[in-house]
Image (cartoon, rainbow, N blue to C red):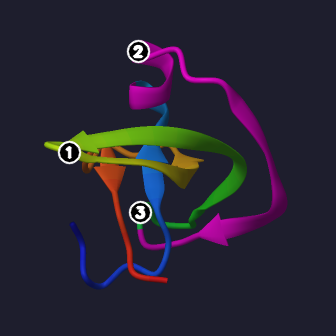
Amino acid sequence: MDNGSSCNDCSIILVEKLTFITKFHPKPYKLVWIKDGGIIVKRQVSVPIFIDNYNENVLCDIAHMEIRHIILGRP
């Protein structure tokens, strides 16, 4: 968890390893806090989260990042 985030982000590495199906982002944008100069976010993925009896699908933007596999923000 990153309480400073305002979006849900997922690593492209996670998406590729788990072979998730992606879709185009309806409003591509530039993400500048991951890398100098920023990166353009163009795709999204629905990530299933299972914690005990809690099940949820979280829509995440896909980013080329090596920080974490998934960062959940507080929109």
User: Can you give x and y, in whole percent of width and height, for residue 56 in the image?
Assistant: 41, 49
Point 57% across, 42% down: residue? 46
Residue where numbered disc 2 is placed: 17
| Direction from residue 59 to residue 47 in the image, left or right | left
Task: Kindly give the residue lying farthest to the front in the view shown.
Answer: 53
Disc 3 marks a residue whose amino acid type is: Ile
Residue where numbered disc 1 is placed: 53
Q: CA distance from mark 1 to mark 3?
A: 33 Å
> Is residue 63 positioned above or below 75 on the image?
above
Q: Which structural element holds mark 3?
A: loop
- The label number, if any, that marks residue 34 in the structure image: 3
Quadrant of res 37: bottom right
Point 49% across, 27% down: residue? 15
Q: CA distance from mark 2 to mark 3?
A: 21 Å
- What is the quadrant of the N terminus in the image? bottom left
Point 42% across, 17% down: residue? 18
Q: CA distance from mark 1 to mark 2?
A: 25 Å
- Magenta stretch holds residue 7: no
Q: Magenta residues, as a range?
A: 14-33
Q: Nearer the viewer, mark 1 or mark 3?
A: 1
Looking at the picture, tell me which residue is in the foreground, 69 or 58.
58
Q: Nearer the viewer, mark 2 or mark 3?
A: 2
Disc 2 marks a residue whose amino acid type is: Lys
Q: Which structural element holds mark 2?
A: helix
